[in-house]
Amino acid sequence: MKSESPQEEKHQAPPFFKSWPGMYLFVLGFMGFLILMMLWFSSSNTI
Amino acid sequence: MSAIDWIVLLGTLLFIVLYGSWKTRQSKNIRGYLLGDNNMKWATIGLSVMATQASAITFISTPGQAYESGMGFIQNYFGLPIALIIISAVFIPIYYRLKVYTAYEYLESRFGIENRLLAAFLFLLQRGLAAGITIYAPAIILSTALGWNLSLTILMVGILVIFYTVSGGTKAVSLTQKWQMGVILLGMVLAFIMIVNSLPTGVSFGDAVSVAGVLDKLEAVSFSFDPSERYTFWSGITGGLFLALSYFGTDQSQVQRYLGGKSVYESRMGLMFNALLKIPMQFFILFTGVMTFVFFQFQGAPVLFNKTAIEKVYEGPRAGEMQEIEADYKLSLETKQEAIQDLLAAKKSENESALGAAADHLRNTHKASEEIRDKAKTLVKEAVPDNNSKDSDYIFLTFILNHLPMGLIGLLLAVIFSAAMSSTAGELNALAATTTVDFYKRLVKKDGSDRHYLRASKMMTAGWGMIAITFALFAHLVENLIEAVNILGSIFYGTILGIFLVAFFLKNVRGRPTFFAAICAQITVIFLYIFYSDVIAYLWYNVIGCGLVIVLSLIFSLIIPPKSNPEPVEEG
């Protein structure tokens, strides 16, 4: 599978991140953060 | 319903429909009609993807699911961000490079026509039936709760959707979905605020959350390996991942939403919008259900929320049993309410041992009241055998109809109709695109003018709308209908996903081995469903179907000789 040309990728990078892999890592990190928040939320309200 | 509620409901729906139809009335060609002239920006795409997936059942049933079983259902969505990343990285660049109208067009360039037609056919079969269920499912619940005529409710939803989807195509669908999502989010936020405001004086939001926590409604994540546990982190990450990958990556009703993007960037950002917001949105909907549960603990709840089912029991010979159950339930609720007050008092006193004892006592009283509820459900099942709805589907509706102020009731009903219409519109648009592009244009009339195909697409949209309405009108003949859409999806999605994954990642595997592998995989999954559905949960059919296509295509590659005329190879 041919990837997009480097020029195209350069112009189409997501905001704040230097590349799409950076954006994807952020999304995964955010998902991990949400799961941790859910775990904290349920454990802090369990008696 | 009051006059104000009718005005809010009909005004909201008609405004969105008429505005959407008027703004998008000028489709000049088929690219404009099916792909919105590739003009859409990421926010429109993001909302459109979200609206197509979130049908009315999301807003009717999900809060009820949380009321009864807590937050655990959120785990089904854990695979979604990962799936959207894979689609963004791998699928989107390929679809854009080949300038396809449908996901299945890509398969012809990679494998040849048989795989394209097979995947397109499976999509039409599965999504065509699902479109009928998307209309029927909310209609049956609303007509039962409100006493509306079921057929008229179905016709109202169906005809409104056909009107603007035929008129404006994908642009009309996306524009109306933006407004519909706005209505949905506004309605849900206001409903949540009303629930919190309706807690008794002296009971804070924190107190309400504590009550929910004690009664195990807040456990959202389970790392258990117990296969009998329905929702776990592991099933979400695996089964949920495959389901999301297939649904968002290969189901034309979703692919069409992001193929209309201005560029790869806009489509990717639209998907990342969903990857970031879908889990929080589902969490909020489930949490609204949990707070509805707490509200009813203080307010007092009926033993069952489906009033029509209870009325039918009272009309029959077992009325006395229901009367006894309702009396027992009322007493159990009073005991539970005392236990809640003891818990809150112990919480204020900050006495750990008193708190522990109060929590145990509350759990015991709750268990007792739930046992009475289970007795009521069993009685209904025996006394009213043609009642197919789950009681949990009526919980949030009961709250809306009985405890929200005038005007807000109309708005929340508009939420439910908006969700039904936005999903159906996305489905009809996709069904028409696949029928026109993958079958009509490809097989029947290959050299028509652009205007001809535009007219054909409009007729296909109307045609599929009629089919969906017809199916919805006769759907009461089928049992367990609301579950059917998930089962249908899981039976076919795995095979379709398998074909696409072989296409993307196994470059040495050609069309014929893949085609035969897909046929064998599909037959196997149908066989498993018919004979082993109590042993294998249907979420796993996605994984099995997909895995079989991949493994069998590799094996068949070694056995089946290539065609003497080489198949088209994907460009680049």
Image (cartoon, grey):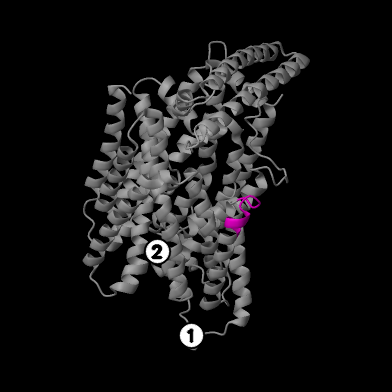
* Residue labelled with disc 2: B102
Which chain does the residue under circle 1 lie in? Answer: B
Q: Residue furthest front?
A: B317
Q: Is residue B91 left or right of residue B260?
A: right
Numbered disc 2: secondary structure: loop
Q: Residue B473, percent across and down?
A: 35, 45
Q: Residue B298, percent across and down?
A: 55, 16
**Amino acid type assigned to the residue bearing label 2 in the image:** Thr
* Residue labelled with disc 1: B566
**Magenta residues (range):** B528-537
Query: In which quadrant of the rendered view does residue B516 lie?
Result: bottom right
The foreground one among B471 and B262 is B471
**Amino acid type assigned to the residue bearing label 1 in the image:** Pro
Q: Is residue B308 left or right of residue A25?
A: left
Q: Is residue A12 left or right of residue A22?
A: left
* Above or below B263: residue B439: below
Q: Residue B163, percent across and down?
A: 25, 47
Residue neighbourhood size for the residue with mark 1, other residues' Cα within 10 Å, grouped as few (<14), some (14–19), many (≥20): few
Q: CA distance from mark 1 to mark 2?
A: 24 Å
Label of residue B222 in the image: none
Residue neighbourhood size for the residue with mark 2, other residues' Cα within 10 Å, grouped as few (<14), some (14–19), many (≥20): many
